[in-house]
Amino acid sequence: MRQPVFGCSSRFALPLACAAALAAIPAHAPAYAQDGTSGVISLEEIVVTSNLTPTAERAVGSAVTIIDETELEDRKVRVVADVLRTVPGVTVNRTGVVGNQTQLRIRGAESNQTLVMIDGIEVNDPSGGSEFDFAHLLTQGVARIEVLRGPQSALYGSDAIGGVVNIVTRRADGTPTASGFFEGGTRATASGGLSAGGSVGKFDYFASFGGLRTEGFSSAAEWKGNHEKDGYENVTAFGKIGFQPIEALRFDAVGRLTSYSAESDDFIGGIGPVDGDGSSEGLQLFGRAQARLDLWDGRWRHTAGVARSRFDNDYLDGGIVTSSYLGTRTKFDYQSDLSLETPAASATHDLTFRLEHQIDAAEVDGYSTFDRSVGETSVVGQYRLGVWDRLFLTGSLRHDVNELFDDATTYRLTAAYNIDETGTKLRASYGTGVKNPTLFELYGYTDTYHGNPDLKPEEAAGWDVGIDQWLWRERLMVQATYFNQRITDLIQGSGETSVNVAGTSEIHGVELAVAATPVEGLTLRGSYTYTDGEDARGVRLTRRPMHQASLDANYRFWQERANVNIELLYTGEQTDLFYNADYSTRVVDLDPYVVVNAAASWDINENAQVYGRVENLFNTRYEQAYGYGSPGFSAVAGLRLSF
């Protein structure tokens, strides 16, 4: 059966032919990142998410973390959610085996308060509580991940009051190249993929096809007497193409398909997860096309595009479909960016105007049937001022006209000041946000959950202050941030319905991040997050550990042909909900835990690499969600080839 409120998953036969066909279709294309060759931390990293346009890191006033392709390759992780566990302020919870529901929270905000984008496409699912389930997102083809923390509604709308995760896949140009990998390991786990890209004349392209399969383990905790394995299969294909007939004009298109099958366990009120014959099958389709025109030597840029995401999910019990969910989001957007310079104070001026129209739709057929949609038109304006290449100020304003709720106006202010003589950057940001109730929260209906059409939008205001300090001839970087966020009329699920918690809920905390290259080839990264969140009744927010920490050590040696990576993850005590027999809830505690992962690789030559990865090296037993199991020791070995 489907787990109350936050769902479960299942299994079906994957349409490989469809995925393969899409793979052949070409398509679109802590604010610190490690240089994979020199080992020196870059001070001029370009950030896209923070201001809607590419911005040098020194000019960004918000807290942002970047994970680049080198780090992804070093860690050998196959699921994006597991990569994000080391990001300050980010919490990831998975209900059992890979492929089951995986939620991400930023700074204690709810999972549906974080906007997720892939290649410029918003991928929050309107039929799934307007959150993005990270269960099915693989790392293959990912070139870069940006995590922007704090309220971003002024730039990105209702789903972004907690923050934004922006995922960018590879874009190839130059001589055509191809690569592939295959790996296998414990639990009959196998993963592989092929990719190719390059440019021909005025065209550039990149395409990727791959997947993951595992027999898994029992999603319901094995130490509670559950032993049935829950398997998972995933096939993902994407492609992008660009056409630039003249220097000032470019067209881009991108398409992505994910087909998955996931087995899961049953859920019984008063007991929790138990062995069962549940499963889910799903198909995700994302696409975007856009045109870009540059005028005045690139100082005035116009971009117009259309994007669509589709989520098709079936939930089964004993092989029989019990409910089906279809969610779509269609978005039309136009953006104009103007960059100017004035002699006074060596000032730079960047103005952005953006117009959007978005349509969300959700169709559910199961315990009940509903088919609803909502449209919203938005206008965004932003001004960025840079003075003497030291002080950078940004102001953003957004007005949303929604078909169901009152119009909303949100804003964001940021400041960054660089003291180059001491390698110091001071930064601060303040933003407001509005999160409208989701279509499922309003109208959803299952055997245990009833929607609440009387819900009001959540309103948020948050701020942070921080310092970034570069030391030791720029071989050591330390970041420290204090954040505070208040959410009024927070929407919480009780197990039976969703309600607004009257009053203001408050979340505050501290984020620390360190990156260092003490000797040639050795990179050390560490993070710590303290999060204290309570709702307006003084009740601690669930699945928000008060303490989290990570340590990642990467050593590249033997003329950079060999690489070793060790990762330590600490998650402190947190609370969760236990569902009683009548599906009312009570709070339970989850114990703290430490997990250690390791990876190593050896470049046989410039075209071949062998590698291996071990997860949960010490076979730690832990819970990310109450009653759900965790993966014990596992290992994979693989081969990567390039042509």
Image (tube, rainbow, N blue to C red):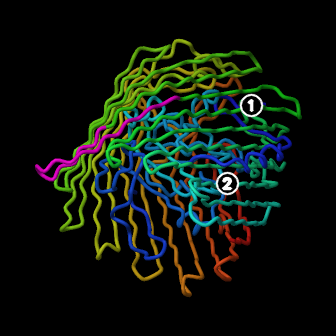
Q: CA distance from mark 1 to mark 2?
A: 35 Å
Q: Which residue is mark 2?
A: 207
Q: Quadrant of the N terminus?
A: top right
**Which residue carries the number 1 mark?**
2
Residue 522 lies, with reference to residue 587, above or below; the image says below
> Magenta span covers which residues?
332-351
Q: Identify which residue, 349 or 454, lies in the foreground.
A: 349
Which residue is located at x 52 percent, y 49 percent?
244
- How far across and how far down the image is residue 295, in percent? 36, 43
With respect to residue 401, does 275 lie above or below?
below
- Can you name the residue that lies furthest to the bottom here? 558
- Residue 432, label in figure: none
Looking at the rendered image, the disc whose residue lies closer to the viewer, 1 or 2, is 2
Q: Position of residue 150 (x, y in %)?
A: 38, 41
Q: What percent of the width, then of the height, locates residue 221?
A: 73, 48
Q: How many marks?
A: 2
Is 261 left or right of 140, judged from the image as shown?
Answer: right
Magenta span dominant secondary structure: strand
Residue for point 52% across, 25% down: 358
Q: Quadrant of residue 400?
A: top left
Crowd around label 2: few <14 · some 14–19 · many ≥20 (10 Å): many
Left or right of 166? Residue 389 is: left
Residue at disc 1, secondary structure: loop
